[in-house]
Image (cartoon, grey):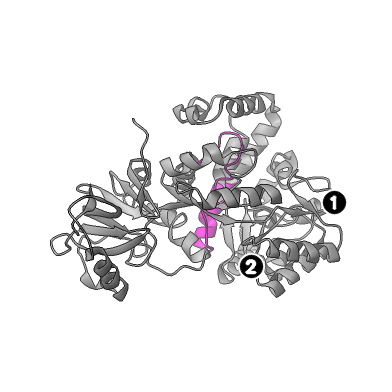
Amino acid sequence: MSGTTSTAWIRRPTAALLLAGLAAGCGTSERADLLAITDVSVVDVDLGAIRADQTVLVAGDTIAAIGPSRTTSVPPGARRLDGRGRYLMPGLWDMHTHAHRQERAAWHYPAYLAHGVTGIRDAGTFADSAAAWRERHRADSLAPTVWWGSPPIDGVPALLSFGTPVGSPDEARAVARRYRDLHFQFLKVYDRIDPASFRALAAEARALGIPLEGHVPLRISPLEAVAAGQRTIEHLTLVLESCIPGMLATIAADSSRDSMTLLADGRLAASLARYDARRCGELFDTLATRSVWQVPTLVQLRGAFLPLDDPLGRDPRLASVPSGVRDDWVRYRADQPPARREAGQALYRRHRQLVADLHRAGVPILAGTDASDEPWVLPGASLHDELTLFVEAGLTPLAALRTATTEPARYRGEPAPLLAPGRRADLVLLAADPIRDIQAIRRIEAVVLRGRLVPRAPR
């Protein structure tokens, strides 16, 4: 890490233009559209450096300038936020959520912002729910930015109530066109779609220019999904299974199962001793070369098979979850057969190791939680847990931090760096350095969403 400052890092034409706008017409009264975060240490996640004693100027929803505090003047009327002893980093992204069913956004959105999550990727809801929430979202100044995925495109019948069943290549192509026309930003593919319909869906997605993302359908392999153009693999579906001789054929032969049921299947847990790392070499190399994003959602898997005595069941953060949802989680855990729980825990532990293996192989990883009503997955807070699990698996704090900041930006096609003049002002102010210790992301002092300082709940 470097504690030095570099004026070249922040001097861009955009900064001069924005600063000129700041100076024009500034009076002595405080202006809501101007914010200055002074004397702060800027966390350059792109370079892995800390730039001390910086002042960050925000105009409207945009970073106007970043520079050494001794040479960066604060325009009259700007609201000041004291950054001494604090660290400013980009806002976090949760790259797998389901925040827009059953009015979840009403309690999800505040929880995201309270934990520094300024953007989320919604991985599927009902089409009409998505349309309604997109209208409400545009009018909500305290809503995180949302990257919208289509309802899950599945086989017949669809596994999920909000899934879209397709039974033929023609139906798959028609669904792709319909969801493209509804302006979803990616097509979400699911477990039971048949191989012919999947291939037609993938080909139509390529022709339409809309990404295909989601689960690896259970009757094909991850290599086949990647060859067809699939851009993400959620929950590491079939990645581990690809490393166990014969397991993909066993799964493909039983179309009654789904990816979550497989993880509780004692046969899969019992097969872990046959894991063959060399067998995974071709897959890992392909995933890395093709930049196929993995969204592990370890916290979802942990919560699905949470031991009865796990401290998470008594976590004080549960107070932010509606009581009815908490009661469902408690019942789910109590009703789970011990054998199922033990099998799931074994798979959870192996998935954690797999995350480190993928990272070492150069496979890109995105942090996501599956926050919806999944057991023991707390919106916002669980993203902190996911990054902690990445570090426990073997990633450095910086590498883990990138999975929720720079990697989501790269996924969205946005240029580096994130903290620079002209970039949107989604910011999190921390009491400690997250590059040294990932737990610092829990020590939030302030959140800025699209240039607006988010009101903080009293402590």
Check if residue 363 falls in the magenta segment: yes
Vertical relation: 54 (above or below) 342: below
Q: Specify the quadrant of the image occupied by residue 197.
A: bottom right
Q: Residues within 10 Å of mark 1 (few under 14, many from 20)?
A: some
385 horizontally vs 215: left or right:
left
The amino acid type, in three-letter code, at marker 1 is Val
Closer to the camera: disc 2 or disc 1?
1
Which residue is the site of mark 1? Answer: 156
Q: Quadrant of the N terminus?
A: bottom left
Instruction: Please tell me which residue lies in front, 52 or 291.
Output: 52
Distance from disc 2 to disc 1, alpha carbons, whole Å, reads 32 Å
> Is label 2 in contact with label 1 (beta carbons under 8 Å)?
no
Quadrant assignment for the C terminus: top left
Q: Which residues are magenta?
A: 351-379
Q: Is residue 317 magenta?
A: no
What residue sits 57% from the left and 61% below the top?
A: 293
Q: Which secondary structure lies at badge 2? A: helix
The residue that disc 2 covers is: 282
